[in-house]
Structures are given as C-alpha cells and as structure tokens.
Image (cartoon, rainbow, N blue to C red):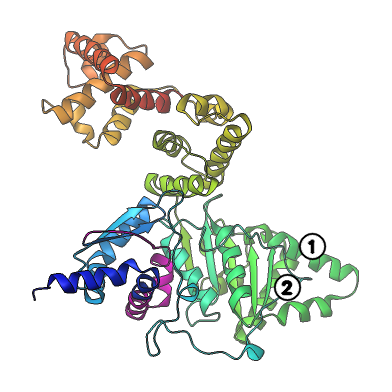
Amino acid sequence: MTIGVDDDESAFSRLEDNKGLAESWLRICGRLKGEVGEVEYRTWLTQIALGPIDGDEITLLLPTRFLRDWVRSQYGDRLNELWHNEVPALRRVELQVARPGDPAPLQLAEAATPPAGSPSAPEEQNPATKPVAEVRSDLVTALDSRFTFDTFVVGKPNEFAYACARRVAEKPSSVGFNPLFLYGGVGLGKTHLMHAIGAELVRSGNVSVAYMSAEKFMYRFIAAIRSQSTIEFKEQLRSVDVLMIDDLQFLIGKDNTQEEFFHTFNALVDAGRQIVVSADKSPSDLSGLEDRLRTRLGCGMVADIHATTFELRISILEAKAAASGVVVPAKVLEFLAHKITSNVRELEGALNRLIAHANLFGRPVTLEATQDVLHDILKAHDRRVTIEEIQKKVAEHWNIRLTDMSSARRARNVARPRQVAMYLAKQLTSRSLPEIGRKFGNRDHTTVMHAVNRVTELMERDAAFAEDVELMRRMLES
C-alpha cells in the first residue's frame, strides 16, 4: 500500500502530540500484554520508555544493554509490526539503552486511559471496596524499600527465579508455586526477591503478610515458650495469607524449631495460604533438615539463582550507576565486572564506594581512582599472573578463540590481540622472551620482541588502544 504525503504528515502530527503518542503506546502495550501474559509482560516489557521520533523511526529506551538485547531478539519484530499497524507512516523501531535524563517508562496506569474494550483498559473499582494489604507488624522484619521488582536487574542466571517471584506476587497460592523455594549463593539476589514479593503484595493485594528470617522465627518461638504463649504464637503465624522465611538453612540442627516450622508449613498449605522460602542450597542438599520437611519444601516450585555472568554484572553496574547520577566510564564498569565476580553485594558495594568518593571530593571516576579507592577489595583478588591467564583474558576481551594465541593465523583481528598478550606477558611475568614465545605456538624470541615494541609504539600513538591495554593490565595485575 502506498502512503501519500498527506497521510504521512497527518500520522506524524498525531505522534508529535504527546497525548497521541502516549495513547498509541498504551494500545500497543495492551496488545503485547494480552499476547504474552501478565508475568512475561511485567518481567521484560514494563521498563521500556518512549524515546524521540526521527523521521519515520521511533526510539524505545531500556535501562540496560541486557534488556535491550533481550527485547530486541524476542520482541523486536512484533514491536515493529504493532507500531506500523498503529501508525503506518512509521517504518522502524529502534531499541537503545537509556541515558541519565531520558524519559521514564510510561506505565499503563500513569497515562491516558485507553479506549473501552482495549486489553489494557483498567477495570473499574469501587474505592470503598479497594483491597488493602496488611503487614503484620508483630510478625514482620521491615521490608527494604530499595528492593523491588523494578530495581532487580534480570539476566539469564536469575530470570527463572524472577519470573517465579513475579507470579507468586501476582497470584499467591498458585498451583505448582506453593511453596516457592528460592536458593543460591551469598549476594545473588534471594533477599531482594523476597522483599520485592512482600512489597508487591502489600501494594496491590488484599492479603496479610508475614516476613522474617529463620533466625527471627526461632527466637520468637523460644520467646513464646518462655512466656508460655506458644498457642498465641502459632495462631498468629497460621492466620496470615503469605508467610515468607529467609535463610532457612539457619534452622539446620535446631530440631524443635524445625518441628514447629513443619507444622506451621502444613497448616498454611492445607489452608491454601502461600509460603515463600529462601536458602543457600536446594531442599535436597539441606542435609541437616528433617526428611519430611525437605520433601515438603521440594514439592512446590524450586528456583535457583546461578552465579552472575559478565553481561549481568555489567547490567547491574549500569543500572546502579545511572540511578546515582554520577558518570562512571564504561571502562571502569568493565574493570569491576571482571574483577568482582562472585558476589553482587560486594560488586554494588564497590561501586557505591566509588560514587561516594566522587561525590565527596568532586573528582571524576577513573581507572586510576578506582584502583586507589578499592585497593583493599581488589587486593583480596590478587594472585600470581600466568601467561595462560593473560591469553584467556585477552582472547575474551577481543572476542577471539583461545587457540588463536598459538595458531599460525596472521589476520589483524587475531595478530593484534596476540601481540598485546605477548606484551602483557613481558610486563606482568618474570618469564624470558624465549619462554614467552614457546607459550605462543613455539614462536621465536624475536617475534615476542617485535610484538612488545609494536604494542608500545601503538600505545603512544593511539589513546583508545592504550586505554584498552591499560584496562587489561589493571584487571590482571590488581
């Protein structure tokens, strides 16, 4: 179909009006929500913000590179189709990572009300009967307002646990999701998801919520025994709609407390109430728990949170840096993501220290400042650098195969990283030139010498190349 000039001008005049743009986006969101379902929509699509229109192209903004790439691969074609159906003059939808100051995501409830019958049209609700959630103040550990679903950065290691947590927050006591058992190592996001579930239930559900650590559960049980109020304690716990217990592994070896939790667990599940539990291991691996309790914990939905990937760590750092308002160079974020790999809590703590230092002293964040400010954290990761480690890190950084380090290939995209690896081997190890040459496919020592001289020369002429090499050196040396 050919679109005339008048049609184009009419379409773009409608889009250039903010209200018209918002209404178009609302209708598209409604259709997407109807197609993919509530959980998937809220997991991946609610963080999209509208960007500018340039000619026949509209830009959609996402907070991290990971989300941008995921939305592009999974929903890119459908977004193009829906926008074109909404405004035929639009030819392309571009997905980009948002920068500080870019628009916030346009939520369905915050914008103009869609037309009646639209999939995104909100249901009418009598204010007098609007559900009000309850948090049992006598049974709750304070929920941290920072830990919400919106602030949880999703990646492949945690996307399943995130989707399960979303499902429970939206539909407690869902078949197959009771209990929800979240497990993973220290600092990977279990507690964040627990708080997010609690916050969502409190915000939107007509339910009573009790959240506490397993340690607090034990202390309250002991206090009830001492005060001869165990019946009251049991009635309080068994009257809630949702019970959340964090760090269940703390109950290992505490037989009486385990028994009380087991009976509370059964009473709540039998009554159709929701239970959410977190631990550092899966139910089958919590060998210190009673068999009957481990069996019951594993009968619902068990979701593990894996160790973070480099891409997820970068996304987390990008999101935290953007929220802080401090400009943190990409090279610094990459340096931190390479150096601090096991614990998200430590990763965020390192970034927070950098940001605080920048705010207190009014200095920009640089690689040099990062190494100085975080010397104690980085020192914990110190180890003797080997040529094999240098080859691996350089190959990962320049996206070539590790075998290329010792191959006969002379293509520039392979030869240059190989030269950099030889240069770093000379700088960071005590190996001789002939020894280094042998590690690179039995090359002659003169080849290594040439590589060192060539890299030195390029670093003097090319500031960007020098920064790349310096980044690699710091990651390996610190």
- 324, 38: nearer the viewer: 324
Q: In which quarter of the image is the N terminus?
A: bottom left
- 140, 317: nearer the viewer: 317
- For disc 2, the marked residue is 260
> Closer to the observer: label 1 or label 2?
1
Queried whether the magenta region covers residue 209, the answer comes back as: no
Label number found at residue 276: none
Which residue sits at x=33%, y=24%?
469
- 189, 96: nearer the viewer: 96
Residue 371 in sight here = yes
- For disc 1, the marked residue is 219
**Alpha-carbon distance for marks 1 and 2?**
12 Å
Q: Is mark 2 on a helix, strand or loop?
A: helix
Q: What element carries label 1?
A: helix
Q: Which amino acid does label 1 sit on?
A: Tyr
Query: Number of numbered discs present?
Result: 2
Magenta range: 26-55
Residue 220 x, y percent position in the rendering: 80, 66
Residue 85 x, y percent position in the rendering: 22, 76
Image quarter of residue 397: top left
Queried whether the magenta region covers residue 44, the answer comes back as: yes
